[in-house]
Amino acid sequence: MEKRISSQKITPNLWFDNQAEEAVQFYTSVFKNSKIGRVSRYTKDGYEHHQKPEGSVMTIEFVLEGQEFVALNGGPLFTFNEAISFVINCETQEEIDHYWGRLTEGGDERAQVCGWLKDKFGVSWQVVPTALNEMILDPDPGKVSRVLQCMFSMKKLDIAPLKAAYEA
């Protein structure tokens, strides 16, 4: 029996209609440190419930940057919304540009605000410079206010103007 790809206690489970395999291939192409693990397939058992062809993908385990996920082809009953999102902490503008560029391909442009985006599968992501947390946690309310005003004017976050607002 193949071993699990990780031993973490809690694993996010992403429910797709029937795009789990496509989504996992896309996500593992976006993140350098990623891999695809075990794949389970539907059988004829329970067809009256799942309505999926025998042999089609049911679940796929995958890892992005050390975080284990499971993708499920569960049908159209449930869809993604912004109540759950994944934060990508970025050290450089180059990282922000990479993740923003890749994850917005085919995504919902209306959902792009303040570092948030929705990808082509409807999953919400926040692409955030790590420096932003330090800036908004500063005890000086003037600095925090300037940074937030600057951030609220952006779609994709840009470190240079955020730092300029912080240091003004």
Image: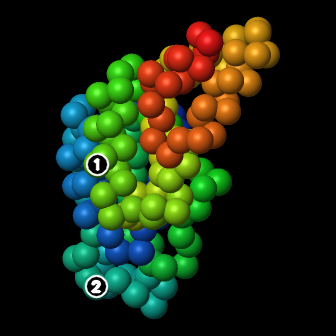
- Secondary structure of the residue carrying tag 2 is loop
* Quadrant containing the C terminus in the rendered view: top right
Vertical relation: 22 (above or below) 142: below
- Marks 2/1: CA distance? 31 Å
Which marked residue is nearer to the observer: mark 2 or mark 1?
1
Q: Is residue 11 visible?
A: no
Disc 2 target residue: 53
Specify whether 129 is left or right of 151: left
Specify whether 82 is left or right of 109: right
The three-letter amino acid code for the residue at tag 1 is Arg
- Secondary structure of the residue carrying tag 1 is helix
The three-letter amino acid code for the residue at tag 2 is Pro
**Residue drawn 76% across and 16% down?**
142
Vertical relation: 78 (above or below) 117: below
Specify whether 118 is left or right of 36: right
- Image location of residue 20, percent across then percent down: 33, 64
Disc 1 target residue: 102
- The extreme bottom residue here reads 48
- Image location of residue 101, percent across then percent down: 31, 46
Residue density around tag 1, few if under 14, some if 14–19, many if 20 or more, within 10 Å: some
The disc at residue 64 is none
Q: What colouring does the structure picture have?
A: rainbow
Quadrant in the rendering for residue 73: bottom left
Residue in the foreground of this view, choosing between 100 and 12? 100
Give the mark, 2 or 1, whose residue is nearer the N terminus.
2
